[in-house]
Image (spheres, rainbow, N blue to C red):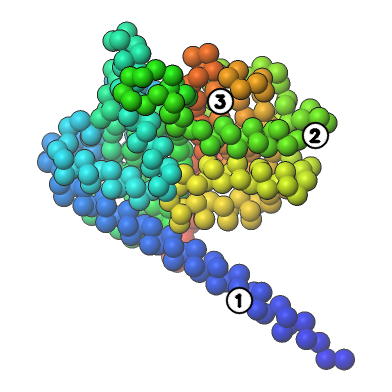
Amino acid sequence: MKSYLPLLILPAIALVFTLTEAQSKSQEKATQNMAKSANGLLLLLTPEQKSKALFAFADAERTNWHFVPRDDRKGVQLKEMDAKQKAAAMALLKTGLSQKGYTKATTIMAMENVLKAIEKGTGPVRDTERYFVSFFGTPPFAASKPWGWRFEGHHFALNVTLVGGKVAASPNFYGTNPAEIRVDDGGMKGTRALKDEEEAARALLTALTPEQRKMAIYDTAAPNDILTGDKKKITALEAKGIPYKELTKEQKKLLEKLIAVHTGNMASDLASARTAKLNKADKNKIIFGWAGEIEVGKRHYYRIQGPTFLVEYDNTQNNANHVHSVWRDFDGDFGEDLLAEHYASEKHGN
């Protein structure tokens, strides 16, 4: 009997290749947009500003990241730029973020004025323009050689590495203090910059059965901060919580929605690539874990961990009104996986 199985399989294979090719083209477009924006900003900088902003790609500074106020942060800061330069710097930031992600980032920056009013000069320097841009590599930037850029300051950090038409954008950190602004200073009362990150997690936790919740809540005490901190290289945390495979269909949708909140901070091209990567690695191995109290306004922490990535979120400091949230890629932080692939290809003359 004649088999028609190959005819049934071929369209599916073609679809896979088409989607992969589309994702590849999308990544290439993203790298081109970033290179155009980066080179455009560099053309506007003075020689002195360039000397602050430019580093060799192999410089240790490329992985020297943090999310707290620092007096030794490198790069050229927005405060040193004129209006055109600032606009170009923010245009570069937009190439790495979705509109939601960009709004969160700029809201976090604006909150420096709120902290300044709350602390009345008793805390670190608070300045909405104390955010720094750095470049790693030799300009003009293009796909032919690896390069990268970073936009960083208090409570926001985006580390981007570009290699051979592909983009890696992690570590990516968002923080907000206060998590909810309860004062009138600056006209921002009621603002919750990372509202979605909390409410999507609570929606999933609420949907769990009592037995499932026992699995998900692995500790009644929340840690004081994200466990990975500003580490340059991370490994998987202990597998605690409830696995994706233990959830019902509707609960799985809620976990996927929570993950989408975090991937959705990235520009759509980068978010699609990130989602495809975690799906390929087997969603059934993703684990959602919660630590701390479940009452709104109390100290809490959660993490989402899969074979390739880790999301950490905590709201514990300042009487549980201070959020830290980060996306990490185990092999892809600072483009490590892309670089390994690139150098292996060069070694074999491909």
| Residue 155 x %, y % | 40, 28
Tell me which label, 3 or 2, sits earlier in the chain.
Answer: 2
Eye-nearest disc, 3 or 2? 2
Q: Amino acid at mark 3?
A: Asp
Q: Residue at x 61, y 25 (%)?
A: 301
The reply, left or right, for residue 72 in relation to residue 82 is right
Mark 3: few, some, or many residues within 10 Å (few <14, many ≥20)? many
Mark 1: few, some, or many residues within 10 Å (few <14, many ≥20)? few
Identify residue for label 1.
14
Q: Residue at x 66, y 74 (%)?
A: 12
Check residue 315 in the rendering and tell me which mark sits there, or answer none.
none
The reply, left or right, for residue 123 in relation to residue 42 is right
| Residue 28 x %, y % | 40, 62
Residue 334 quadrant: top left
Picture quarter with the N terminus: bottom right
The reply, left or right, for residue 86 in relation to residue 291 is left
- Vertically, is 340 above or below 348? above
Q: Amino acid at mark 1?
A: Ala
In the image shown, does 250 or 163 lie closer to the viewer?
A: 250
Eye-nearest disc, 3 or 1? 3
Identify residue for label 3.
314
Identify residue for label 2.
209
Tell me which label, 3 or 1, sits earlier in the chain.
Answer: 1
In the image shown, does 215 or 170 lie closer to the viewer?
A: 215
How far is mark 1 from mark 2, CA to CA? 42 Å
Q: Secondary structure at mark 3?
A: strand
